Image: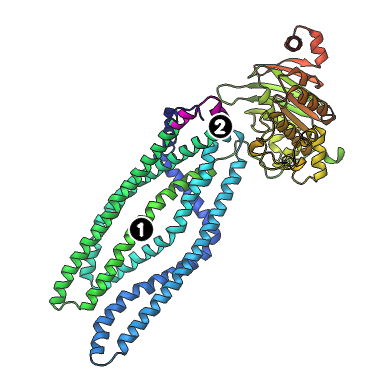
Amino acid sequence: MTTTSVDQWRGVAAEQQEDVAASLSVLLRRRTRQLLGGLLAPHRRAVWGYTAAIVVSVAASMAIPALVGIGIDRGIPAARHGDDVPLVVVAAVIVGCALLQAWLYRTFVLGTGRIGQRILLELRQRVFQHFQRLSLAFHERYTSGRMISRLTSDMDTISSMLDAGLDTLVTAVLSIVTVGTVLLVLDWPLGLVSLASFVPLLWLSRWYQRRSTAAYRRTREAIALVIVHFTESLRGIRAVQAFRREPRNNEIFAELNEDYRRTTTDSFQLLTVYWPGIRFIGNVTTAAVLLIGGLRVIGGDMKVGVLASFVLYLRRFFEPIADVSQFYDSFQGAAAALEKLAGVLDEQPSVPMPSRSAALPDPANDGGAWRGAVELRDVTFGYRADAPVLQGFDLAVPAGQTVALLGETGAGKSTIARLLARFYDPVDGEVLVDGVSLRDLAEPDLRRAVAMVTQESFLFTGSVADNIAFGRPEATREEVEAAGRAVGVDVVVRRLPDGWDSTVGKNGAKLSAGQRQLIALARAVLADPAVLILDEASSSLDAPTERLVQRALCTVLAGRTALIIAHRLSTVGIADRVLVLDGGRIVEDGTPAQLLEAGDGEYAALHRQWLESLL
């Protein structure tokens, strides 16, 4: 989006803010819990085992302050009278508890770390697979930068929380509960004084929770916008440099980056209040306990060892609370990221695929192969509900016929192609191949029935052979090269250093537009569909390459149903039938010769203009 203004970027952010309005926020949190529950379900038994390990570990750790008090009150007096055994036993038990605590804690960290990485692996796989299943309508409105943000920035945030914070949370919570109980058991008056600090702590935590939740959502959205602009600026680098847009893009990126810095700073500033606040409350409580406990020791109502144990436990009471506050910092970022991922995974394809196909063509007919008869029956469709492109549209194409679609931009040519490829479903009516509705075909059968070569001719990083084989990965090398020769790719590879194994570069950057289109055509030939759609597939070819492709297509399309969308009448010449569209209606229908003989139609006019352009 290199032409997008800063205000428009902020408008995008404002639209996203609406997504976290009160009612939707509650729904997303429920989806987030469901997603997290589903990810944890396969690991429940292991989670309970590691939970038991950390409970014992915390218990061993919590026993140490009590043992110190016993050593002070019993071991030291006994040692003064020549009996060192109690003090030695207490010291040995402390060492044993420390060893047990360290071993169990290590077991817990290793185990939960493995579970966390498996969860992340599963989550990445789910998100990637779901993005591929979602319909074209979703991808046209959801930018590639946002997809990258979901799979990188959001995943990294969740990973950081799992790697660095989960063990801290569990041990901190167990420590708080355990220490709170122990404080009451050791000395309930001092225990009540200590627990009174919960009132300001809860108020402070609630204050932080309310503000940090909104702050971290803003942060996740801000970084997503930075990634979107960065990604799309580099994807369109040719246009950026051709129109000298670098300075303006730098300005937009600088403002988006500044928004991200500002939202991150706002989140961090909340911590500068929360963390010192917890420590201040803890220090004030410790001072109060030491004052009251010291007076009770002087009065003989409390032993020194008990007070020492109490102070040690109190320190272990507030340190975990500070740890929880630090974990909550990373948790808020991870929760916002998981919420966005849950929202993406909750998206449903607008073109759902059945798990199994309906009845396929009669097995007695050519061994069950598709013949390729196409029918659009009373089809109504529009990209917006208030602007139908096709309305009550009917079309029948017999098997094996090549049909060319002509018409001005917006006439409905590409819409027919997209419906037949099932990138979209009609609002009303049906699209059928060999009498079977496309809605009833599972993905493998649909792709065997229909294939499409688009104007973009996208190539993946890899070799020429790899890109042709994309149409049918299980094909042999001989089949790949045969498909390439059918459309003239062999002429291209002769000029490349490694022939069929030559790399095409990112997005096919090492090849010309015509060469990329030839490979895309070979890919479709190898897939061998019953119906082949060529949507402006020769628009980027120069005249010599186009003639080469036309000769190849005469052979490739023989006996195969084909729909050709083209503005070049030279390409239309290979068609058996020409349909001229206007406003979503067929205004001319016939062979090229018949329409030329009519003399007064749109096709005849276009043909005359084409002949004049050649003179």
Instruction: Tell me, yes or no, whether the highlighted magenta stretch contains residue 241.
Output: yes
Q: Which residues are magenta?
A: 238-250
Q: Residue 323 location, x and y as percent?
A: 35, 59
Q: Main secondary structure of the magenta part?
A: helix
Per the image, the residue denoted by label 2 is 237
Q: Secondary structure at mark 1?
A: helix
Residue type at tag 1: Val
Q: Is residue 150 above or below residue 65?
A: above
Per the image, the residue denoted by label 1 is 324
Q: Residue 75 location, x and y as percent?
A: 27, 85
Instruction: Tell me, yes or no, whether the highlighted magenta stretch contains residue 394.
Output: no
In the image, taking residue 113 as reference, residue 281 lies left or right, namely left
Q: Residue 559 location, x and y as percent?
A: 85, 30
Q: Which residue is drawn at the image coordinates 68% and 32% (left, top)? A: 457
Q: Is residue 140 above or below residue 78?
A: above
The residue furthest left is: 299
Q: Residue 167 location, x and y as percent?
A: 43, 62
Task: Indicate the quadrant containing the C terminus: top left, top right, bottom left or bottom right.
Answer: top right
**Residue 16 shows in this picture:** yes
Q: Which residue is drawn at the image coordinates 58% and 29% (left, top)? A: 238
Tags 2 and 1 in contact by the CB under 8 Å rule? no
Q: Which residue is drawn at the image coordinates 50% and 61% (left, top)? A: 113
In the image, taking residue 569 as reference, residue 232 lies left or right, namely left
Label 2 vs 1, first from the N-terminus: 2
